[in-house]
Image (spheres, rainbow, N blue to C red):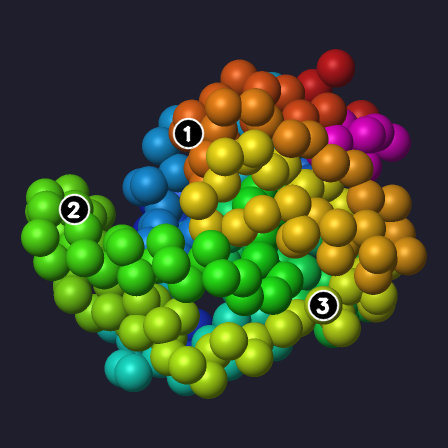
Amino acid sequence: MQNLNSTGFLSIDGAELEYRMLGPTPDAAPTIVMLHEGLGCVGLWGDFPERLQAATGAGVFAYSRAGYGASSPAKLPRPLDYMHREALGVLPKVLDGIGFGRGLLVGHSDGGSIAAIYAGAHQDHRLHGLALIAPHFIVEDISVRSIADTKTAYETTSLKEKLARWHKDVDSTFYGWNDAWLDPKFRDWDISEYLAYIRVPVLIVQGANDQYGTMRQVEIAKDECYCPVDVTVVEGAGHSPHREAPAVTLEAVTDFATAALRDDRTLAA
């Protein structure tokens, strides 16, 4: 187990992954591990981790995957099974590296998909729930169209400049994600088989106006999961309800986390 400061880097398989640790460390309380979106990183969570830590009393650990934020670069092109590789190869080492003893995974978009793969592939007794914000279980037409539009925006608007504030190699970050999703072979990507093996409660927070996915993603989870699946649909929000409707999203995730960890007396009342 690596010693955790409030900020720093985890050494995983030769890569240095930046992280933030808020509140009690994993040896002192349950931990909420946050997994960012396809163009996200530690910093792009904004103040949501701080607010979640204050609301739950749990420790909150957020990290940037290789190729994102200040973490080590990733080898390009990204393989089309990159989310499987993160869930099955990297995330277990991150959890062990921080001394994860008990808690939840909170994942947004790609991070939600990674969390679902992990939970379906590992019967991890330490894991007590998944909070998935706008996750993908299959590729939809709307996903591909919007990701193609995002490429146009990256190449013709100020989007690249905005993202460059957060990622040290912004082109690698962007094209590593974008090229994978726009590869015609990626249309066959489907992780719904993992859902039947999840053995912990699941919360899905879905923006009603999500430009990258429809309620079909929620329906798949309800159809495939044998575990409880709670759904919060956030009216007026798109793909990032924790940024677009933070109060509603925070309340949903906090209520879910508190229920999942209710027997732990170290949590806030």
Total marks drawn? 3
Question: Considering the numbered disc 1 on the image, is that residue within a helix, a strand or a loop?
Answer: helix
- What range of the chain is rendered magenta? 256-263
Which kind of residue does numbered mark 2 sit on?
Leu
Percent position of residue 200, x then y:
83, 52
Of pointers 1 and 3, the one earlier in the residue sequence = 3
Taking the spot 76% from the left edge, 73% from the top edge, the residue there is: 193
Give neighbour class at mark 3: few <14, some 14-19, many 20+ (Cα, 10 Å). many
Percent position of residue 140, x then y:
54, 62
Question: Considering the numbered disc 3 on the image, is that residue within a helix, a strand or a loop?
Answer: helix
Question: Where is mark 1, residue-wise?
Answer: 243
Query: Gap between marks 3 and 2, in whole Å?
Result: 32 Å
Relative to residue 38, is residue 104 depicted above or below?
above
Which of the labelled discs sits on residue 114, or is there none? none
Query: Gap between marks 2 and 1, in whole Å?
Result: 17 Å
Of pointers 3 and 2, the one earlier in the residue sequence = 2
Question: Where is mark 3, residue-wise?
Answer: 192
Taking the spot 16% from the left edge, 46% from the top edge, the residue there is: 159
Taking the spot 24% from the left edge, 69% from the top edge, the residue there is: 175
Compare residues 230 and 211 and report the one nearer the observer.
Answer: 211
Residue contact between numbered discs 3 and 2, judged by CB atoms under 8 Å:
no
Which kind of residue does numbered mark 3 sit on?
Ser
Which of the labelled discs sits on residue 159, or is there none? 2
Query: Gap between marks 1 and 3, in whole Å?
Result: 27 Å
Q: Is residue 26 visible?
A: no
> Magenta segment: does it hold 58?
no
Q: From the viewer's perspective, is 249 left or right of 125? A: left
Secondary structure predominantly adopted by residues drawn in magenta: helix
Q: From the viewer's perspective, is 29 left or right of 134? A: right
Percent position of residue 246, x then y:
48, 23
Taking the spot 50% from the left edge, 23% from the top edge, the residue there is: 236
Compare residues 4 and 247 and report the one nearer the observer.
Answer: 247
